[in-house]
Image (cartoon, grey):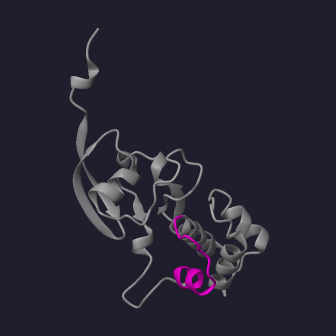
Amino acid sequence: MTDRSREPVPSSTVTLRVNGQDHTLETQHRWTLLDVLRDRLGLTGSKRGCDRGECGSCTVLMDGLPVYSCQLLAMQARGRSIVTIEGLASKDGLDPVQRAFLEEDGGQCGYCTPGFVMAARALLDGNPNPTDSEIREALAGNLCRCNAYGRIIASVRAAGR
């Protein structure tokens, strides 16, 4: 029986396009996109919640669609456009969804807020005037531990206006 703990971990150089900027780095094949975003690129807005793709705290946009970054290997993001919560704001200020979450008190403790904001941004990009039912469906993959769902829905509704 061999001791696999002594075997080298496979890695490759990968270029990831994050928030409009290319980042070339050596990446172990086992690292998730969340690992690379937080630990290698210093983009800590995406949160490590459940690490099982159930809570949505790590949600980012990949080619405009919300994905759980804890469930994707960084290698799978090659050639794709990744946007994190840090990438939503522009030189002119916060994204309308970020602003609405602040104005409508959409985040209580704030831990889940980046994931909700990213899922809401994806919804509003495709449907700028969603019904409450459509908002609930789009946000169904995100969990708020503080139970601020009413304020979150109001925030998305306000951002759509």
Q: Is residue 132 above or below residue 92?
A: above
Q: Residue visible at 35% across and 39% down?
A: 30
In which quadrant of the rendered view does residue 157 lie?
Answer: bottom right
Where in the figure is residue 27, as x and y percent of width and height? Answer: 26, 46
Q: Is residue 99 above or below residue 14?
A: below
Q: Which residues are magenta?
A: 97-111
Q: State the quadrant of the N terminus.
A: top left
Where in the figure is residue 139, as x and y percent of width and height? Answer: 66, 63
Q: Nearer the viewer, residue 36 or 55?
A: 55
Please say whether residue 22 is visible from this viewpoint.
Answer: yes
Q: Nearer the viewer, residue 123 or 113?
A: 113
Q: Is residue 29 above or below residue 141?
A: above
Q: Residue visible at 26% across and 24% down?
A: 5
Residue 5 magenta-highlighted: no
Please say whether residue 77 is visible from this viewpoint.
Answer: no
33 sits to left or right of 120: left
Residue 100 magenta-highlighted: yes
Across the whole image, how many numbered discs are drawn on residues?
Answer: 0
In which quadrant of the rendered view does residue 91 lie?
Answer: bottom left
Q: State the quadrant of the C terminus.
A: bottom right
